[in-house]
Image: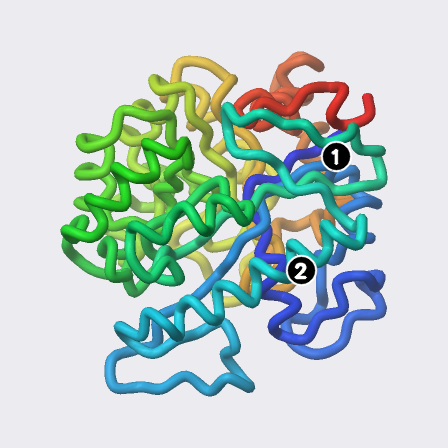
Amino acid sequence: MRWFDGHLDLAYLVELGRDMHAGIDACRGRLLPAAVTLPSLADGGVRACLGTIFTERASDGFMPDPRREPYAYAPDDAPGAWRVGMRQLRLYQAWAEAGSIRLLSKRGGQDDSTPTSHSRLCLGILMEGADPIEAPDQLSDWVDSGVIAIGLSWWRGSRYAAGNGGAGGLTSLGRELVSRMDALGIVHDLTHLSQQATDELLTLSNKPVVASHSNARSLLGGRHNPDWQRHIADETIAEIGRRGGMVGINLVRNFLRFPLGASDRPGIDELVAHIEHVASVMGHRRGVGLGSDMDGGITAADLPRGIGSPSDLPRIAEALNDRGWSDAEIEAFAWANWARFWGISARENGS
């Protein structure tokens, strides 16, 4: 069974010292037990994904330790953000040059690359937090280098937009970047935006958008949850569906149940509840897929019971089958919905 994962922090894991070419049992260092390496994705049938450029603005008054936080940059240090982001971009380019992956072209772009085999991961580059773009007029450089989707902020926000950890909306730079992204055909990822920034972006842009790794706010306590902005509102889900966009379902345990005990590990049935809720709010099953966030600052122990690596993803398909989903609908969740959104043809993936 083929899978398209809408959110994997692969370069971030390399920044933390993980050997992405090893098996998960051979991983050493941080975020153990591991779930994600390139071989584990292949073993689990993950044939395509969005791989992130993840950067994090440090707290005000703090300087990040490059040995512990190689993905971080000082507040308002645009050149520093550019450096850490560019290092991750160059990793993906090096993998592509070595033949380990194939870079996915932007949505609606002309793809003249050769077909890929089933053993070669098709990867689209998603920038998670836009501060590595030093100024909006630099966007085209990143696009020319392979970036196909951008989330304007992360939890603490950016020079472009407020993040889900605070208040506020788009900045003037953010509004300019939104317009430039639309002009260049770069997809917006709403995942880490504040609610105000989300609403402003959807007013400013009429393009299809995604929430690459977000679950349903209404199933997670609504505004009673201190992290309510991190989860996606039903109104936003409906608008994403109306535009033909995608919501990627996050597998991290605190995105499945609220409140959550320190040792609680929700089951796959709770994951399926988010899948079905998103589909119900959209009114169809064409706009929901996987956005696992496996190992994105967590370990395999933070995934649902029964899932410890990509090889366990078929258990989600089994649960959907038990809920009455047809084989075609399950295949759409696992692969075809994301593939259609990005314009991946069967030929391009060796099928």
Dot 2 falls on a residue whose secondary structure is helix
Residue closest to the eye, 210 or 149: 149
Disc 1 crowd rating (10 Å Cα; few below 14, some 14-19, many 20+) is some
Give the side of residue 52 with respect to residue 232, left or right. Answer: right
Quadrant where the N terminus sits is top right
Locate residue 226, reporting x and y percent: 27, 58
How far apart, in angstroms, are the residues tagged by discs 1 and 2?
Answer: 16 Å
- Are the residues tagged 1 and 2 within 8 Å (C-beta)? no
What residue sits right under mark 1 in the picture? 314
Residue name at image x 49 percent, y 40 percent: 148
Kind of residue sitting beneath label 1 = Pro
Query: Residue 224: which disc?
Result: none
Residue that badge 2 annotates: 300
Residue 292, position as x, y percentages in the image: 58, 46
Task: Determine the image quadrant of residue 177.
Answer: top left
8 relative to 59, above or below: above
Q: Position of residue 115 (x, y in %)?
A: 78, 28
The quarter holding residue 235 reads top left
Between 113 and 260, the residue placed more toward the observer is: 113
Amino acid under label 2?
Answer: Ala
Which residue is rendered at x = 48% and y = 23% of the image? 287
Q: Nearer the viewer, residue 204 or 325?
A: 204
Q: Residue at x 84, y 69 (%)?
A: 26
Residue 266 visible in image: no
Q: Residue at x 33, y 55 (%)?
A: 153
Kindly state the secondary structure of the residue where label 1 is placed: helix
Q: Position of residue 99 (x, y in %)?
A: 80, 48
